Every structure is written in structure tokens, then in C-alpha cells.
Amino acid sequence: MKVASVLIPLPVPEAFDYEVPEELTVMRGDQVAVPLGPRLIRGVVAEVFETTGSNRKLKAVEQVLADPRLPERTLDFVEWAARWTLSPPGEMAATALKGLRAPRPRPERRVRRVEGRSPARPTAARTAVLEALGQRSMPGPDLARAAGVSSGVVKGLVDEGVLEPFEVEAVAAFDPPDPDHAPATLNPDQAASAAAIADAVAAGGFAPFLLDGVTGSGKTEAYLEAAARALRADPTAQVLILLPEIALTQAVIERITARFGVAPAEWHSGVAPPRRRQAWEAVVSGRCNIVVGARSALFLPYANLKLIVVDEEHDGSFKQEEGLVYHGRDLAVARARIEGATVVLASATPSLETLWNAHQGRYRWLKLAARHGAAVLPEIGLIDLRECPPDPQTWLSAPLREAIGETLTRGEQSLLFLNRRGYAPVVLCRSCGHRLTAPDTDSWLVEHRYTGRLVCHLTGFSMPKPKACPSCGAEDSLVPVGPGVERVEEEVRQLFPEARTAVFSSDTVPDGKSARALIQSMADGEIDILVATQAAAKGHNFPRLTLVGVVDADLGLRGGDLRAAERTYQLLAQATGRAGRADKPGRALLQTWTPEHPVLQALAAGDRDAFVEAEMAEREAASLPPHGRLAALILSSENAMAVEKVARDLAEAIPNAERLEVYGPADAPLALVRGRRRKRLLVRADRDVNLQAFLRAWLARVKVPASVRLTVDVDPYSFL
Ligand code: ADP
């Protein structure tokens, strides 16, 4: 008997076996309909094997679906990713099929000539229509426009039977990119990097690179040139460019379109479903060469993937924490290995993991030393707030105010950076000291003045600001504490009433379109002072921006999780790197209460190596990543007792293991989210320990009831 193991989108660790009826031919990667309880469900065949009649009564595969077979290596990757992240393989496979679940675009309605029919009354307008159409077909409104007549004329011809309407399937044209459309003249560093990457693609086989260059050094230009060479050598090659934020995609898409003469396929949550369906089909059939996307683009079924670029590879947004938990950068390297492809991790501030791999010689290290052309890196100064504190209830110190004033006078732009949305991060009762928190979540409510609401940034819960303190009932006693971007903008408006100001945060620019509009008006010089969260700190090029002020450089350093210093360094280096990217020199001023902190000293000195060395030494001493490995188990449930019980069971079931420790269970820092109690356990292991095998053995020993959710987070980035 023939049996097919089928991956089904369910939270189970194994594939399901089905009998393959005689009349069906089934292969690995085929999409099939199989019975599950009373319904039919779509699955992917992982394996087909012969078995000599065990008497298990297997259900049979119902049908092999006409949809494309998943390419072998896509399936290899999906299975590997599931094992690495301890995720259900069927759910991983479903991610690769997501594009198929989107509806096809609606067919296009067109008109064409009916053979042998002519109008009874050939008026000038009708003749114009028939001439404009010729032997072609086109949508009625386009035809009317082309002929310069009203649409009634076309309709008249249809009614008379001279033209006939019909429908065609809208096939997305992903025209082949032209590698020679508009090549850039590269500087020697860029040319060497592009050549090294292109040579690796040509040689074939897995080849990982770190493309390391300061902001504005021309990394994008270099990897686009490598892509061009790869496409010249093999017009069927596919290139994937991963970006951390949707807000960045537009700029990159425009550059690719300018470079190659055609737009790439776009893949992220902001793309309309029919368009995604078209991209999916074009990728699997090899009709599309360049894909620009978010981390989920890694799961597309590439026919011939040759080059993956992970731009801003250090960025934490590559880590997906909801649903399937995975790190897009790490999986990109795995995908390249499985595809036998080249992968380029690009950054001005590479992650410690990547730097370590480069140091070890696992990744080839390409360096772009200087900014392209005349642009130079901004001078970075620290403002010691102990010496010049801002006035009470204000946030900008005298030196920063002065610098903004000078920049304004010169007609140049300033960016004030504060990684805090809203008006004030905390609302406090002056009478009783109560801090307002969300009703079913351990987090403070943030005041938003634009919307007049108090918002929980974790869950999205919001409510109008109450008149009285919910704790003591005192009226008009609730006061905002601390600054968010809206409050800093208020201060800026008071200080510089003549300046044109704007706020850039996920509240003011909730989608790609509004982000583009704001970026454009910044680029066009319509804004003098932009107050922004990290949403604006990444990637964008603002040629007239010459001053970056960091309102609270200590902010990220206080959290105290594993990557607090690293993240702060990266974020501030990116933010300050926005200044002076064109011909005018830029400067950056960082307000801090702790100017002696090594992160701030390294930033001021522009000495990344010193920072990395110090941070790496600390990680090594504690055997933490990249010198050790971590995994977190997070338990949550509305039933607090059930969480306690599973936590206890897990603690009792820890398998014996060397060079590995388990910490916890402990209440998570966010112990209550949306009414669910949360507990955490953390595993630390030496690098050579098989962490996944340990976790699998451990979890196999404990029964988790349906009321408790257990999330496994391998290489966690969030410790909340
Ligand atoms: P990065 O990706 O390292 O931040 P970019 O590739 O965005 O740098 O380059 C920074 C700026 O310099 C961009 O405006 C880009 O168009 C320009 N640039 C980079 N390399 C070249 C080149 N070889 N010729 C002309 N302009 C370049």
C-alpha cells in the first residue's frame, strides 16, 4: 500500500498519514485535499512511501489539487524552519501557500471588433472609435478616451453588434528586469563588493556575506549591481530583497525600478490580496525575477532563487513574535544554504551575531569605508543634562535649542528623535499618585493628544481620558508625566512658532501611503523640524537634513535586557546617520544624563569597534549570544492556576543536560496581558549544545492542557 505523509495546517508536531488510492499519482510537494474529521482540508505532501499492509485503517487522499507543486527546496526549507523553531510543520507549510489563499484578481472587461459587422450609420465619432481600436482589444473606457469620444459611442457600437464585450484574465506582467537599464558608476569599494557577491552567485552554492558600511556608503547601490550581474548571467535567476519595515519598501522599489526599468514584485501585508496572488504565481512559475518584501517573503516558493539580501539585517523587526516565532535574518541564511544561494546581510551597525560570524570567517566580510561622494558622517556631540538640564516640564536643553535655531536660520532641516509614541508615556494622579494602567494588562496607559485618548501600546486598548482619577475620585488631577513625540513637538512649536513642524510615528503615519507623503514633503523641504520615533530613523534619505537631536539617549539603556546596549547603539547610530547625507555636513547632538556610558562614548567617538569589543566581552563572560544560545518558553492562560500547574510540571520535567541551565519559571515582566496570566522559563546553553533536541525531549514529557498556550521562542529578542 502507498502512503502519503501530509502536512496539515494544525498545531501538531507531525505530518498525517493517508492512503494513496491506486488511481492517484502523488509526489512530494503536491497539494492535496484530505479528509480531517467531517471536512476536507488542504495539505502538502511531505513524503510518499510503500508499506506492507499494517492493519491501521488510514483514510485516503481525496484529490490532488491542480495548484502548483511546492518546489523541493521550498519544502526542505519549510521543514527545516519548523524543526529549528519547534513550530508545527503544517503551519510553516501553510505560510508558503499564503498567496494561494488570496482571491484571483477580477477579470478585465474589454471590447473587440465583430468580424464582418460595420455600423449602419458611420458617424465621425464611430469611425474614430473603430480606427482607434483597429484589430486590438481594449477596455471600453480606454477606447473612448483614445478616440476622444464619450463612452456612449462605444456602448452604441456594442448595442449594435459591431463591437463585442468579453473578459480576459488579468495576468500581472512582471516584465524581465533590464540589468543594463541605468547602471551606476560604482566607487572602488562598491565595485569590489558587487563583484565578490556576483562571483559567488555565478559560482553557485551557499555563500554568505556581511556587507558592512556606514549609513549612506552605498550598500544598496552595491547589492543592486550584484543583482544586475546575476540577472545578466542567468535571466531566470530570482533575487529576494528583505526589508524590516513596510515604510522602507517604497523607496527601495523606486530605486529598483529606476535601476532595472521595471518594478519588482512586492510582498508584505500592505499588498492587496489579488496582487499577492499574482506575485505568488509569478514566483513559483519563475516569471518574476525580483521580489522586495517583508520577512514572510522568505516563504515564497521560488523556482530559482540565487540571491537573498537582508537589508538593515540588525533590525529587530525581522523577528516575528506573534503566531509562528522566527527570526527572518536567521531563516534567510538557512534558506540560502538550502537553495545553494548567496545571501548578503547588509547593515551599518551589524548585529553581534553577524559580526561574530564574520569574525569567525563563516561570513565573508565586505566593507564600504566611507560615505559615497562628498557626504561625510555627522559629527556627534553629547549634551550632559546634569550641566544644562531643560527647564521644568520641557525636554530640550539650551544647546539643543540653539542648534535647532541655527539650523532653521540656515534654511536646513532638523530631526528630533524620541522613541516614544504619543504625548506622555504615563498619566499620574496628582492627588493620590495612582498611575493609570490598562484594565486587563500590566502596562501603563499612554496619553495621546491628537486623538484625545489614553492608549495601551501593547494591546491597542484605548479610552477617553477620564475627568476624575479612577482610584481616588479627585477631579482634574490627572497629569501627563514625561515626553512623547507629540509633547516634544508642542515644545518645538512654542520655541519656534515660525517653523513648519511635523510628527513621524506609527500614529501619524499609520500606513505606507501616509509615510510616503510625509517622507516626500520632508525631502521637498516642506518641513523644518521633524519629531520622530524610530519609524523615521531607518533607511530614509533626507538630503536637506543637517541636524539630528536625540531627546533621550538613555532611554533604551534602561531596559536592561540582553540587547539593550546593542539596540541603543544601533538605533542611535542609524538616527544620527540621517544627518548630512548629501553635500552639506551634518551634526548630531545626544541629550544624556550618563555621558560616561560606554555606548554613548562609542557613539560620540564614532568608534563602533570599541563598542562591539566591549559588548562582546560581556556576552562572552556570561556565555550569552552570540557566545551561547537562549530559548524561552512562555506560558499564558486566562486560568492562573492552569499556568501555575504547567509551569510546575515543566520545572519538574527538565531533562538532565550539561552546559545548559534553565531559569524560572517566573512571572513574566508583563504578567498580565489581555486578561491572560503569563509565566516564563529561559534556557541558556553553550553553542555546541543541541538546544532544539533538548527542548523537544523536555516538551515531550509534559502535557499542556488546551487552556494553556505554550510558546517556544528560540533565540528570543523580547524578554517581556
Ligand atoms: P546605504 O544603502 O549604504 O545607506 P545608499 O546606497 O542608499 O547607501 O547610498 C546613499 C546615497 O548615495 C544614495 O542617494 C545613493 O543614490 C548615492 N550613491 C551611492 N552610490 C552611488 C554611486 N556609485 N553613484 C552615484 N550615487 C551613489
Image (cartoon, rainbow, N blue to C red):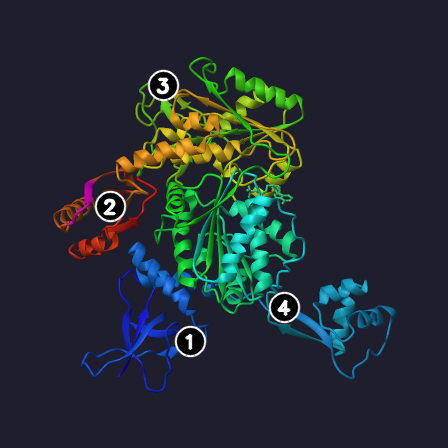
Q: Residues within 10 Å of mark 2 (few under 14, many from 20)?
A: some
Ligand 1 sits in quadrant: top right
Q: Residues within 10 Å of mark 3 (few under 14, many from 20)?
A: some
Q: Position of residue 160 (x, y in %)?
A: 76, 77
Q: Which residue matches tag 4?
A: 108
Distance in Å between CA atoms under marks 2 and 3 = 50 Å
Q: Earlier in the sequence, mark 3 or mark 1?
A: 1
Q: Position of residue 97 (x, y in %)?
A: 43, 64
- Of badges 1 and 2, nearer the viewer stands 2
Q: Looking at the image, which residue is at 37% across and 29% down?
A: 557
Nearest the viewer among 51 and 123 is 51
Check mark 3 vs ligand 1: CB closer than 8 Å? yes or no.
no
Nearest the viewer among 478 and 410 is 410
Q: Earlier in the sequence, mark 1 or mark 2?
A: 1
Q: Residues within 10 Å of mark 4 (few under 14, many from 20)?
A: few
Q: In the drawing, what numbered circle is on residue 430?
A: 3
Residue 6 seen from this side:
yes
Task: Please tell me whether mark 4 sits on a helix, a strand or a loop.
Answer: strand
- Of badges 3 and 1, nearer the viewer stands 1
- Of badges 2 and 3, nearer the viewer stands 2
Q: Which residues are magenta?
A: 657-665
Amino acid type for the residue under numbered disc 2:
Asp
